[in-house]
Amino acid sequence: MRILLLASAFNSLTQRVFAELRDLGHAVAVELALGDDQHLTAAVRRHDPDLIIAPMLTTAVPEEVWSACPCLIVHPGPPGDRGPSSLDRAVQQGLAQWGVTVLEAVAEMDAGPVWASADFPVPPDVGKSDLYRGELADAASRAVLLAVERFASGTYEPAMPATHTWQSYLRQEERRIDWPHDTTETVLRKLRAADSQPGVLDTFLGTEWYLHGGHPEPHLTGTPGELLATHHGAICRATTDGAVWIPELRPRRRPGDQARFKLPAVTALGNWPPLKGRGELREQPTTTESHQRTRGSYSDITYEEQGTVGFLRFHFPGGAMSTDQCRRLLTAYRETRTRPIDLLVIGGRRDFFSNGIHLNVIDAAHDPAAESLANIEAIDDLVEEILTTTDRLVVAALPGNAAAGGAMLALAADEVWCRGGAVLNPHYRLMGLYGSEYWTYTLPRRVGPEAAARLTEDALPLTATAARALGLVDRVVECGPGEFAREVARMAARLARSEGLPARLGAKKAARERDEAVRPLRAYRADELRRMRSVFDDPAAPYHALRSAFVRKRRPKETPEHLRTATREHPRTECPNGG
């Protein structure tokens, strides 16, 4: 079928639905709902789809659209649930189970007949955005594909749910933390229900901030609301019965201010006048060894060993890696090279693997061009260290999405293992960059020069399955988000015990020496950095405007051309439903 996706943004769920439908042979294009109903109606007429699907839509579908073409809405709640904050409320209320529904658009929001639905568990220690990209996305994928199958059959009749329950928008008054009375569990639920957006509005140090993300701290205590410590860019604040770590802050925007955006909490506070003169906050230990001693405390980088397998785990908010985070990860990686292990697995337990350099930190820097280069150099150093590790195998384990330099970081490993629900974006073009991370060496080596050129120019997302077919991924791990780390540990233990491991290590070392003789790694790096530096140092380069728009979440003026025209690969087919 010809399927048109309507979305407020080409976010993670929209990308996944887009890529999975294309894998099934459907002709799929995207139109962004940018607030102009007439433009959207004209765009739908131009596409002439058999079916419209809205994976993520924050506005109502115009009647001119849904009355002319079947339109299915993905709602992040079970059948009968209605309202704009369904997932937020499920997390804040601590529900153990939730659902997603694919329903037909009608005049009333979320009130149409149901084409498909799916339930999913809500882990108690997972934030809303992680849940959205994980368990919810898995359930939404199942429901969307079932709804498309039912629609294509031409025989299925969608049914109205027995009841409807409207849940209003979750306002800041309900999200606000009552520091003198809220327990750690209550504070964490509120933080996790708003972790990426909109954040929890709070007042401290004489200023209003949005708090983003939350992790428990089992050891430190203090006066509720008090700042107790900093660690890895996060701040620790006391609760009535413990403390919580808050990784990111965003100043509240006031009338006349420029748009403000999330930053690592310590970075956001560092230049804030009320903090000056208060002295340094107590800093937690940062070595890998101390991470093992204080297990349970917040840390964005950890290391542990199981037999002869080492696990270097990292989890950075939003998947972005700042200069400091890259350098700390490099230090931790170098420490693992002193350990008596045969296999090293890098990657987090769940959610993002990496999205490359930290555009927010770069944009907030005094000299964004210089910080851009420093960030690229830091991630390049990490990739080079992985590429030159020849005394053990390295596996990149991707529990979730990876993009740009983060996707290329994974390719530095000997094997890439990817959870089946992950989406990969191995390209840089949409940010106006040529790219670094030694991609001109690793990407063609895996997929060939023609496929490498196509991937970087098309700039379209890939499912893990499609990436496996291309050679970007070696193993697809079909499991839920919560089972990925356990499955990876099992697979890694088996690989570490394999009889052919010594021969693989010998072949790896020989191959690296041959490649170095043909063209040294420093030559790839020099060419990539030359192109990147020319962009960073040019104030008129599109990168600077694109970066600014990205971090400030500015809506584009129109749907990008590569999304509107993505259907060109697929021929027109007749729809059994006669759409």
Image (cartoon, helix red, strand yellow):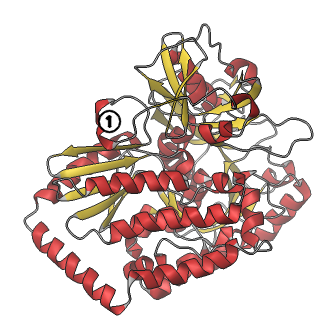
> Residue 205, located in which quarter of the rendered image?
top right
Q: Amino acid at mark 1?
A: Ser
Residue underneath mark 1? 290
Residue in front for this viewpoint, 181 or 556? 181
Residue in front for this viewpoint, 453 or 221? 221
Residue 171, relative to residue 522: is it above or below? above
Q: Position of residue 194 (x, y in %)?
A: 63, 32
Which residue does the image show at 52% across and 13% down from the upper left? 222
Residue in front for this viewpoint, 304 or 113? 304
In this view, the residue farthest toward the bottom is 518
Residue 452, relative to residue 170: is it above or below? below
Residue in front for this viewpoint, 455 or 346? 346
Q: Secondary structure at mark 1?
A: helix
Residue 224, relative to residue 304: is it above or below? above
> Residue 455, located in which quarter of the rendered image?
bottom right
Q: Position of residue 447 (x, y in %)?
A: 41, 80
